[in-house]
Amino acid sequence: MDRSWMYLAPRSSQTFVNGVQTFLNFAFERACVNGTLIKCPCTSCLNMKYKSRQTVLDHLICSGFRPEYWKWVYHGEGTTVASTTTTYDEEEEILRHEMHEMLDDIFETEGGIGVEMHETASNNSEETNTRRSEFDDLVKEAEEKVYQNCKYNKLSCVVRLYQLKCLNGWSSKSFTMLLEFLKDLLPKGNLLPKTTHQVKKIMASLGLRYEKIHTCRNGCMLFWDDKEKDEVCSFCGSSRWKVHEASPEDEESPPKKKACKILRWFPLKPRLQRFFMSSKTSNLMNWHHIDRVKDGKLRHPADALVWKDFDEKFSEFASDPRNVRLA
């Protein structure tokens, strides 16, 4: 199928409009949702948002197709009307796009940096430049294959492996052993990280970091806030640090102090904000208000008397369905 029209200018020409109609007919035949919606491939929606036929038409005429979308993998290309079998090349493209989509969700919301616009961002603050550098590194890793002809790029592979580690409770030691084995198993020159530490550095760039807070060995207190610089517990008097046996090398380079116990604190607000950053989860945060079946039966916590009583007491809070209730 000739697609030379996709990036022609002007987009108001009859050739482009006719081409878009051809695309819409193709997409609605193979990848339609609820009979009325398809993913919009314009430069703003980037195949992340479902729109009606007329809206997609308007977006494509106003903004054009997202760059390099020659193969319509998000609109049924590579499948028949009755089949949803995905080819190897399409899976590779989908994995690559999912990583770009994730980076857009994170960085575009944080500081106006996204896959499509990071080169033109104008804010030159030190923090923004640091995040832009992290973003550029992650984009590079989303483009690099783990090894030649591998369907996984480096970023998607690291994210998947780390997800498996977290879901199955693997220790850092066992995860490092697995990485070392995979590194040796895969073809020479592969880009797979060798240690858990290297993987965590990549994951930290994606945000949702945690903070380390030293604690008393007996759990009496946190060395935090006004107690942050204390050396001993205010309650039991135990030292904050592990006991280290001196050695001759210590005279040249004293060993770094290590805390007896560490609390890893995962701040709540950034994690709630991330739900709204992601195009895949933001709609779910409003589901209880928009799509919930309201027939008087107890189907969801929003149907419970406690929820309704809370809404009556705090009507201003309840007026915005995006507000999150924690229980």
Image (cartoon, grey):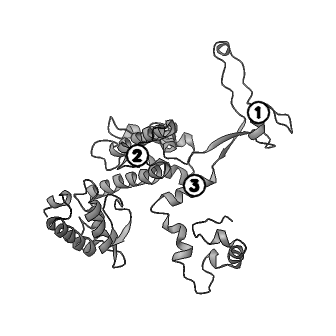
Q: Which residue is mark 3?
A: 271
In the image, is 199 to the left or to the right of 5?
right
Camera-nearest residue between 151 and 263: 263
Q: Are marks 2 and 1 in contact (CB under 8 Å)?
A: no
Camera-nearest residue between 26 and 92: 26
Camera-nearest residue between 283 and 109: 109
Q: Earlier in the sequence, mark 1 or mark 3?
A: 1
Whole-percent x, y for residue 280 in the image = 45, 63
The kind of secondary structure element at disc 3 is: helix
Task: Find residue 240 and name its label.
Answer: 1
The reply to whether residue 85 is visible in this rendering is no
Gap in Å between the C-alphas at discs 2 and 3?
21 Å
Residue 206 versus residue 167 in the image, above or below:
above
Residue 72 versus residue 242 in the image, above or below:
below
- Report the residue at 47% width, 51% height from top: 106
Task: Find residue 155 and name its label.
Answer: 2
Residue 81 versus residue 73 in the image, above or below:
below
The kind of secondary structure element at disc 1 is: loop
Quarter placement of the N terminus: bottom left
Q: Are marks 1 and 3 in contact (CB under 8 Å)?
A: no
Quarter placement of the C terminus: bottom right
The reply to whether residue 140 is visible in this rendering is yes
Whole-percent x, y for residue 67 in the image = 27, 53
In the image, is 191 to the left or to the right of 326?
left
Residue 319 versus residue 43 in the image, above or below:
below
Which one is in front in this view, the residue at disc 2 or the one at disc 3?
3
What amino acid is found at the position of numbered circle 3 in the picture? Arg
